[in-house]
Image (spheres, grey):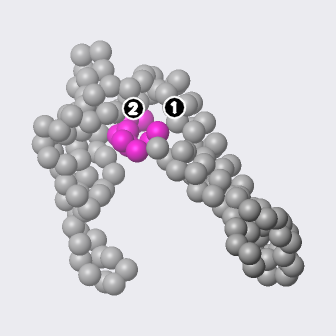
Amino acid sequence: MNLKFRQITFEDIFSGILGLVIGCVFIGGGFLVGNQVTQERATLKQTQGTVVDSLRRRERDSKDKQKETYAPVVEFLVKGDRIRFTGNYQSSRSSNGKIVAVRYDPKQPRTTARLVDFYEDLLPWMSFGMGGLSLISGLRQIFPIYLSSGDE
């Protein structure tokens, strides 16, 4: 392994700085999402709910084709009271009887209830990973020294 120097062009500097900026944005976004999830867990209550029905809606996509979307109707208990709410519309339908995680504000469970996404914990880490790769790539573009393994 030999250390070699290379000449840096304007394009290298520009793409390196762009990679650094994009990496910082991804890492900052990861911290924001992570803090939001932590705050929700500290202030909101989480329980299990059951999908009791599905609502169907027809929409037009960007190519003006009709497609059907479905929203689960979820029911859960708060101090003995049954509370129902409608989740977000998705392309797939949730089966009746499915157990889902629900998060809500104990002061206003009827208006604040929402489904908990199963990938919620993964999202900040994915953002950190993509940001780290972008930072490394950007630094590599700006740095004038590289390792050479051959007798070039």
Which residue is found at the position 70% from the left and 59% from the top? 136
Q: Are marks 2 and 1 in contact (CB under 8 Å)?
A: yes
**Furthest residue to the top?**
79
Amino acid type, residue under disc 2 in the picture: Arg
- Left or right: 6 in relation to 116: right
Which residue is found at the position 87% from the left and 79% from the top? 7
Mark 1 residue crowding within 10 angstroms, few (<14) / some (14–19) / many (20+): some
Label disc, if present, on residue 40 of the rendered structure: 1
- Left or right: 123 in relation to 98: right
Q: Is residue 22 visible?
A: no
Is 11 inside the magenta-drawn segment? no
Front position in the image: 73 or 15: 15
- Of the 4 image quadrants, the one containing the N terminus is bottom right
Give x and y (percent) for residue 80.
Answer: 24, 16
Q: Earlier in the sequence, mark 2 or mark 1?
A: 1
Which residue is found at the position 28% from the left and 28% from the top? 48
- Bounds of the magenta span? 111-121
Q: Quadrant of residue 5?
A: bottom right
- Mark 2 lies on residue: 103
Give x and y (percent) for residue 150.
Answer: 70, 72
Give x and y (percent) for residue 60.
Answer: 30, 76
Is 120 inside the magenta-drawn segment? yes
- Left or right: 36 in relation to 44: right
